[in-house]
Image: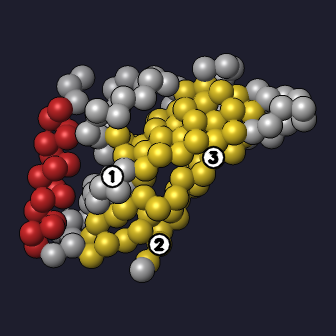
């Protein structure tokens, strides 16, 4: 099993792109880990929602809709600027296999602080049938999200 890691700092209301597409689409990926941490732990107060999508988002919100087929994972993170308050994190994954780019969005509903993310993706070699199904699903998902 091969694991690819990605990390970044996303700003409030921002969206990062993780480039995964290939010319032939023969490599798929599955999320195995998502972790987030405050840019300034114990200093910045954050109530943040990080979401991973299979398609680019035209509108970035903190709303979480599990009926959205393009939503692959969610992390909800709370951190206060006092050591008396603890950090909490809730992470949920969809075990979907995808072979196109993914998009990380972030909203801080308390302030406007940035947040670090770390993602581990398991590489999955796709046969021709799996490649076709993953690619068609990604294309279908793109048509579901209208600007």
Find residue 76 and report its image quarter: top right
Which quadrant would the C terminus be assigned to in this image? top left
Question: Label 2: how many residues lie within 10 Å, few (<14), some (14-19) or many (20+)?
Answer: some
Q: Which of marks 3 and 1 is nearer the N terminus?
A: 3
Q: Between 43 and 16, which is closer to the camera in this rendering?
A: 43
Q: Which residue lies furthest to the top in this view?
A: 110
**Dot 3 or dot 2, earlier in sequence:** 2
Tag nearer the camera, 3 or 1: 3
Classify mark 2: helix, strand or loop.
strand
Q: Which residue is drawn at 85% across and 36% down?
A: 42
The residue where tag 2 is placed is 3
Position of the N terminus, as image quadrant, is: bottom left
Query: Residue 46 appears at what percent x and percent y?
Result: 70, 28
Q: Which residue: 55% across, 27% down?
A: 107
Q: Name the residue under label 3.
A: 36
Name the residue furthest bottom.
Answer: 1
**Residue 101's disc number:** 1
**The one of 10 and 90 positioned closer to us in this rendering:** 90
The residues bearing labels 2 and 1 have C-alpha atoms spaced at a distance of 16 Å
């Amino acid at each position: 099993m091969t694991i690819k890691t990605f990390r970044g700092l996303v700003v409030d209301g921002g969206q990062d792109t993780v480039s995964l597409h290939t010319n032939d689409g023969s490599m798929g990926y599955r999320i195995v880990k998502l972790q987030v941490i405050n840019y300034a732990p114990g200093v910045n107060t954050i109530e943040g929602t990080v979401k991973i999508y299979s398609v680019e988002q035209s509108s970035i919100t903190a709303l979480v809709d599990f009926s959205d087929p393009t939503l692959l994972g969610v992390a909800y993170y709370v951190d206060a600027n006092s050591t008396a308050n603890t950090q909490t994190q809730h992470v949920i994954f969809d075990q979907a296999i995808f072979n196109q780019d993914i998009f990380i969005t972030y909203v801080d509903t308390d302030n406007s602080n940035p947040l670090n993310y770390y993602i581990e993706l398991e590489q999955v070699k796709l046969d021709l049938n799996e490649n076709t199904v993953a690619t068609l699903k990604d294309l279908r998902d793109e048509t579901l999200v209208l600007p």
